[in-house]
Image (spheres, helix red, strand yellow):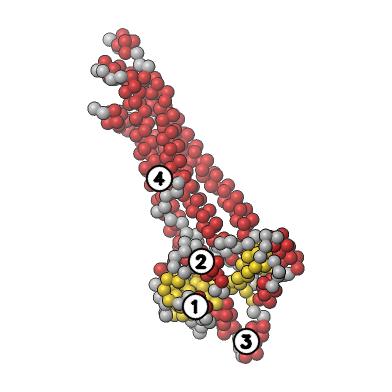
């Protein structure tokens, strides 16, 4: 009988201890794997969605709220700012580009964002079907993100009605949008957005509130946007522009790089706790494996002596103990990674229902290989002392003590 099959039989002869050790190892691998899998994807999503944006300018309030609502579209914006102030910002000598955003309506849970064609260039978006470019930003035309098109089934040429508010309110039935095109998947924030012209957003709300032509003229003179995405002309602008915005205008400036770093530090506390919990489970499992193997070697000293009498070399006897530990580690790695990806699939489903960050379970994170290597290493380390004890088994002494 081979060493692998014999070690498996030895392991299965004590099913309760084997299951307990397997469960501890599996939970440890699953915890660490889940944190790495989801954390890596969240970090990549944040980095990808920043897309070289240097500054976000909007209404005064929480800077992180401004970033989450304007860049990642995960929060409610703090308010609106006058269009004239954003236009003055665009004329600043150190500002290279300003992309205004108007946020406030939605369609089946997806945000309708009024903006300019430059937003397509910011994320290098391509149109997979229908019209793109300036034609797609004609009044009351809309471009659907890939996830929006898949969820709603809309195609170019079809019409839809937006709802007031980001979580669904009354419908703007008198001013429907027409789908101009559908964007190719970019695996970024634009996948879950409905893009349209600023003029379209203004028209929807002006038509809903203007009582006559005079009201319409007043509304047009007081037009607002929600915020603006800014790219600097020179690196020196990072020092002067935010200070100018915060001190000389009624708006607020927030640097995405700074706020995202702060956010990830806050999230990192939770991930470190989960990571530490998984490592504690792995250490506990290693200790449990060590105790189980040590007891098994002591209880089976007569069996080991018999194997030696039948011609088994000391190295093979030690290998039997090591293989038992490896069987547990390999099974735990397989089950643990399966559980980690299953938990990631559940999180991905919950985030998709909430139109939040895209997370998938069907991706391999390189750090998972280190989890497997660590689990195998711990298992081997736990088996070293019992294996050494089996290797040093004194056949003559055992036979004398067991006549």
Which residue corresponds to mark 2?
124
Contact (Cβ within 8 Å) of mark 3 with mark 2 = no
Q: Secondary structure at mark 3?
A: helix
Nearer the observer: mark 1 or 2; the answer is 2
The mark closer to the camera, 4 or 2, is 2
How far apart marks 3 and 2 lie (CA) works out to 36 Å
Q: Quadrant of residue 348?
A: bottom left
> Circle 4 is placed at which residue position?
337
Q: For marks 4 and 1, give the CA distance.
A: 44 Å
- Pointer 3 residue: 216
Q: Residues within 10 Å of mark 4 (few under 14, many from 20)?
A: many
Residue labelled with disc 1: 136
Asked if residue 253 shows in the view, the reply is yes
Tell me the quadrant of the picture where the N terminus can be found.
top left
Q: Looking at the picture, how far across and down is residue 100, in whole percent? A: 61, 72
Tell me residue 230's x, y (percent): 63, 66
Residue at position x 45%, y 71% in the image: 127
- Can you tell which of label 3 and label 2 is closer to the viewer? 2
Residue 180 coordinates in the image, percent (x, y): 46, 78
Inter-mark Cα distance, 4 to 2: 35 Å
């Amino acid at each position: 009988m081979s060493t692998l099959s014999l070690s498996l039989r030895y392991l299965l002869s004590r099913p309760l201890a084997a299951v307990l050790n397997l469960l501890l190892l599996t939970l440890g691998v699953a915890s660490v794997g889940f944190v790495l899998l989801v954390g890596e994807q969240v970090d990549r999503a944040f980095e990808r969605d920043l897309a070289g944006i240097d500054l976000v300018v909007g209404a005064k309030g929480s800077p992180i709220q401004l970033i989450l609502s304007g860049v990642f579209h995960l929060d409610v914006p703090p308010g609106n700012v006058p269009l004239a102030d954003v236009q003055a910002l665009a004329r600043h000598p150190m500002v290279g580009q300003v992309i205004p955003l108007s946020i406030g309506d939605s369609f089946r849970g997806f945000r309708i964002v009024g903006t300019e064609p430059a937003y397509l260039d910011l994320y290098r978006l391509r149109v997979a079907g229908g019209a793109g470019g300036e034609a797609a930003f004609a009044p009351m035309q809309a471009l659907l993100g890939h996830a929006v098109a898949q969820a709603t089934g809309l195609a170019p040429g079809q019409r839809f009605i937006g709802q007031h508010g980001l979580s669904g309110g009354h419908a703007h039935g008198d001013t429907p949008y027409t789908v101009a095109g559908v964007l190719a998947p970019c695996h970024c924030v634009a996948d879950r957005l409905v893009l349209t012209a600023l003029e379209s957003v203004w028209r929807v709300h002006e038509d809903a509130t203007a009582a006559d032509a005079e009201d319409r003229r007043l509304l047009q003179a007081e037009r607002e946007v929600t915020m603006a995405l800014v790219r600097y002309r020179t690196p020196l602008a990072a020092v002067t522009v935010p200070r100018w915005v915060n001190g000389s205008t009624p708006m607020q400036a927030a640097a995405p790089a700074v706020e995202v770093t702060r956010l990830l530090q806050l999230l990192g506390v939770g991930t470190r706790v989960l990571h530490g919990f998984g490592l504690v489970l792995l250490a506990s499992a290693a200790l449990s494996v060590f105790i189980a193997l040590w007891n098994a070697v002591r209880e089976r000293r007569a069996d080991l002596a018999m194997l030696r009498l039948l011609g088994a070399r000391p190295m093979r006897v030690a290998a039997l103990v090591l293989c038992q530990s490896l069987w547990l580690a390999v099974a735990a790695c397989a089950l643990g990674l399966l559980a980690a990806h299953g938990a990631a699939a559940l999180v991905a489903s919950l985030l998709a229902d909430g139109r939040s960050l895209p997370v998938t379970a069907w991706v391999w994170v390189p750090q998972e290989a280190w989890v497997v290597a660590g689990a195998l290493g711990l298992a081997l380390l736990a088996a070293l002392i019992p294996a050494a004890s089996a290797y040093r088994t004194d056949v003559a002494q055992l036979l004398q003590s067991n006549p």
